[in-house]
Amino acid sequence: MSIKFIKMKKLLLLLPLAYMAITAYGQTSIPNGNFESWNSVTYDYPQNYPYNSNYDAFFRYETPLPFNVIKTTDAYHGIYAIEISTVTSGTNTAFGYFLNSNPKNGNPTEWTGGTPYTEVPTGIRGYYKYNVATGDSAVIFAVFSKGGINIGTYLYPIGDLHADWTLFDFTFDPPLETAPDSVIFAATSSNIMVSDYGVAGSVLTLDSVSFTGVASQPEEMNGNFEDWATETLLTPSDWIMQTNYDQRGVESRTVDAVKGEYAIEVKTFLGENDGRPVARGEQASTGYYPDNCDGNCIQQGGHPYTNMKDTLAFWYKYTPSSSVKAEVYLNFKKNGNSIKWEGVELLASLDYQYVEIPFELWQAPDTVIVNIQSLRWEDTLVSALGSVLTIDEIHFKSQPILYAGLPKFVPDNTLNIFPNPSSGKFRIRNGAEINQVIVYNQVGRQVYSRLLTVGEKLNEIDLTSLKKGVYFIEIYDQQSRHTKKIVIQ
């Protein structure tokens, strides 16, 4: 996908304070634009099989699907077995699967890695139950490799209706000709060789899986599914993450925030294009692309928005692994159709930088989708892996973020506000051009806010209308955020 951005114009929105006060409470800000709210969910997966469809169910779809890799006590032997199923919600259907290695691509004949194993089995056996949906079957995979090269891929459909435990026993044909150094074992609830998404309602239960013709099983096989691990997943509320297994165990939530407790980090991961490894940018978005759209995908979702002229503002840090760029862009829509894309490319910055994207549309939209991406679509070289983009406080200037409590204040001696204490009039001395001033009382309520246009100078603020007491002033300029405690006496 390639998006051509129109170069940013030097336009800033003029918003008198009175108008801003009305719009701040009369419109809806970008949902969770300060990334303070996060969804958390915990699930079980079979030990040594962290690559499973529960992760997809949570991250891949606009609305999380039910987890479809489940620990069940309906076991053939021992206490537990594994149950995987093909589930559906709305227009999305997803088959259940698990495997012990990141496949990187969808072609099993190219898979390598997995659990260490050096014996030469003659086949694979186990016990299963299957509740088959019409025309569907489950699939068992055994994929062997040596020195990073695939030396044997074996796929076996198992289908029909089996309410009782049933033996499967397959012989590898042709047989393995050499000893491997690793093996991938996997299973799917639907036949993905026939259908990309499977048939909803297909349920496979497996237990007591082992290789035949060998003296020992792989140490990490866990073919009896007695050992299970637990994982907790986090995602920002009202945002949809586009990520993959390379991000496992790496949280998108960070405490390195400009304001409040949290910000979001998106990280570049390893993907593939026709079997070739490429870098892909992790994305956080208020919209989504339908999963089952057969290549004709139009971004959906977003939130209501009708301004023709405004400015998107946010803070960012970016640590690229090479000379690449991140991006933040907007998709304005009207009646379901995109009417304009507007965005900015982000360069490396170790410290938080303040960015504005002013825009003026030719017609009023009804929806806007906000997209944050750790890598431009055209940057695909694997040298970009590891690039990290951190974003906080993303909002439209007509719709500032409102806090219920005190923001996170860090005293700043580079900002000179005097006299302090005063009767309510404070002079400000700051070398950089000021963009915005916000004042909070001691319980975190915003009591004053002012936006400045380009070229406008601010030397004094008048707070004489406020009661005597301690306040916190927050000043944004083009480089950073400054905070000070002030006293009105």
Image (cartoon, rainbow, N blue to C red):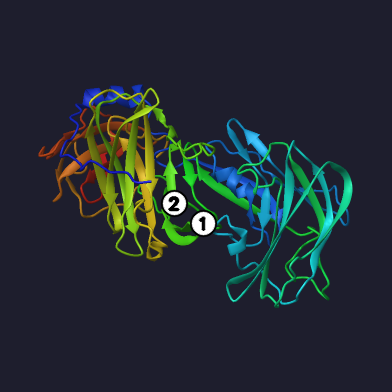
The relative height of residue 178 versus residue 173 in the rendered view (above or below) is below
Res 268 visible: no
**Dot 1 surroundings within 10 Å: few (below 14), some, or many (20 or more)?**
some
Identify the image quadrant of residue 420.
top left
Give the left or right position of residue 292, taking residue 457 as reference.
Answer: right
Looking at marks 2 and 1 on the same chain, the residue that comes earlier in the sequence is marked by 1
Per the image, the residue denoted by label 1 is 247
Give me the residue at 88% from left, 56% from top: 77
The relative height of residue 110 versus residue 433 in the rendered view (above or below) is below
Residues under numbered marks 2 and 1 in contact, where contact means CB atoms less than 8 Å apart: yes
Give the left or right position of residue 181, taking residue 489 as reference.
Answer: right
Give me the residue at 44% from left, 51% from top: 282
Give me the residue at 34% from left, 35% from top: 331
The CA distance from mark 2 to mark 1 is 9 Å
Considering depth in this image, is 465 or 315 the residue closer to the camera? 315
**Dot 2 surroundings within 10 Å: few (below 14), some, or many (20 or more)?**
many
**The disc labelled 1 sits on which kind of residue?**
Gln
Considering depth in this image, is 487 or 215 the residue closer to the camera? 215
| Residue at disc 2, secondary structure | loop
As drawn, the label of residue 282 is 2
